[in-house]
Image (cartoon, grey):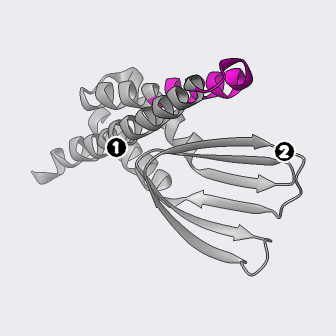
């Protein structure tokens, strides 16, 4: 009897992760964009545009989370896309990618000095993409929270459809 409620609970937990993390990320992105626009606009146009794109992605997380809470079928697909995008973190010479909403627990492999394998926990939301000529070590990580959320979402969808 309790089995029927579990898929709904799983779906709602994932929707809360997307909504809460999306709200945190949107607030940070908009605040950062306002800070950039208060300074000399012509010098910060690119950064302001990037913050606008990040705000859009976090807004999409909020919208998807709300619609997932309501059980809209299209929201399952978008939630999957957003969660898959949050699984990897990668950094190598000249490039960095990181994206998470809510919180993350990364299991990472690194060639940076003094770190080989490690865990990293962060609370909040972030998107980071950099293309730099600076040579840094290699880091590859997996967001265990996003993997767990994707698993819960999959369980909620297969059980609620079956």
From the image, tell me which residue sits under label 1. 14
Q: Earlier in the sequence, mark 2 or mark 1?
A: 1
**Magenta residue span:** 39-58
Relative to 34, residue 128 above or below: below
Give the image location of residue 150, x and y in percent.
45, 47
Disc 2 secondary structure class: loop
Q: On the picture, is 152 further left or further right than 53?
A: left
Relative to 25, residue 43 above or below: above
Residue 47 among magenta residues: yes
Q: What's the residue at 22%, 41% (across, down)?
A: 8
From the image, tell me which residue sits under label 2. 132
Give the image location of residue 9, x and y in percent.
22, 46
Mark identifier at residue 148: none
Front-lying residue, 117 or 137: 137
Q: On the picture, is 92 further left or further right than 73?
A: right
Q: On the picture, is 135 further left or further right than 66?
A: right
Please state, as top left, top right, bottom left or bottom right, where the C terminus lies in the image: top left
Relative to 89, residue 114 above or below: below
Front-lying residue, 19 or 47: 47
Relative to 16, residue 66 above or below: above
Q: Total of numbered circles in the picture?
A: 2
In the rendered image, is residue 57 in sight?
Answer: no
Disc 1 secondary structure class: helix
Residue 79 among magenta residues: no
- The CA distance from mark 2 to mark 1 is 34 Å
Q: What's the residue at 43%, 50% (across, down)?
A: 124
Give the image location of residue 144, x and y in percent.
50, 60
In the rendered image, is residue 33 in sight?
Answer: yes
> Residue extending furthest bottom?
114
């Amino acid at each position: 009897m309790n089995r029927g409620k579990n898929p709904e609970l799983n779906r709602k937990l994932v929707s809360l992760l997307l909504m809460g993390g999306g709200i945190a990320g949107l607030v940070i992105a908009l605040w950062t964009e306002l800070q950039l626009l208060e300074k000399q606009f012509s010098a910060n146009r690119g950064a302001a545009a990037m913050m606008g794109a990040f705000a859009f992605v976090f807004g999409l997380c909020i919208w998807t989370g709300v619609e997932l809470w309501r059980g809209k079928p299209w929201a399952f697909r978008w939630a999957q896309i957003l969660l898959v995008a949050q699984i990897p973190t990668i950094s190598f010479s000249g490039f960095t990618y990181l994206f998470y909403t809510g919180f993350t627990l990364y299991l990472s492999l690194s060639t940076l000095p003094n770190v080989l394998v490690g865990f990293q926990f962060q609370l909040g939301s972030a998107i980071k993409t950099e293309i730099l000529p600076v040579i840094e070590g290699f880091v590859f990580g997996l967001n265990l929270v996003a993997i767990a959320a994707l698993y819960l979402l999959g369980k909620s969808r297969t059980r609620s459809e079956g």
